[in-house]
Image (cartoon, helix red, strand yellow):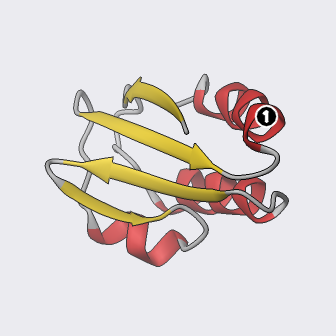
């Protein structure tokens, strides 16, 4: 399992566009992708679930990736999360 910590810097927090972007990338991989915030964990392939976490600007999230292609998936997801 790989973990990618990230502080959300977008002034709008984890908004719809970012959630859809992350979920679209996560869908490309066979590995399980989860997003954790404030002790709650959701499916990283479901943008609506990510939105329900209510992540605001300046808050911390962790993306966990586990599966057969986790290394490659983590690299791709890190590139996207650099824009958060």
Residue 63 drawn at (x, y percent): 47, 42
Mark 1 residue crowding within 10 angstroms, few (<14) / some (14–19) / many (20+):
some
Image spot of residue 69 (x, y percent): 82, 46
Q: Residue furthest left?
A: 38
Instruction: Name the residue: 70% across, 34% down.
Output: 74
Q: Is residue 75 left or right of residue 22?
A: right
Residue 70 appears in which quarter of the rendering?
top right
Position of residue 59 relative to residue 63, above or below, is: above
- The residue that label 1 is drawn on is 76
Q: Give the residue displayed 37% in from the left and 31% down from the top.
A: 8
**61 relative position to 58: left or right:** right
On-image quarter of the N terminus: top right
Tally of marks = 1
Out of 5 and 65, give the one closest to the viewer: 65
**Frontmost residue, 42 versus 82:** 42
Q: What residue is rendered at 50% in x and 29% in y? A: 4
Residue 6 at x, y percent in the picture: 41, 26
Residue 81 position (above or below residue 70): above
Helix, strand or loop status at disc 1: helix
Quadrant housing residue 21: bottom right
Q: Decide which of 26, 18 is in the foreground and name it.
A: 26
Residue 79 falls in image quadrant: top right
77 left or right of 61 in image: right
């Amino acid at each position: 399992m790989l973990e990618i910590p990230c502080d959300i810097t977008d002034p709008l927090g984890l908004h719809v566009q970012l959630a859809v972007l992350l979920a679209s990338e996560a869908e490309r991989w066979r590995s399980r992708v989860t997003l954790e915030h404030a002790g709650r964990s959701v499916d990283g392939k479901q943008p609506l679930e990510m939105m329900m976490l209510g992540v605001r600007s300046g808050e911390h999230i962790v993306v966990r990736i586990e599966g057969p292609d986790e290394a490659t998936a983590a690299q791709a997801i890190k590139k996207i999360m650099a824009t958060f």
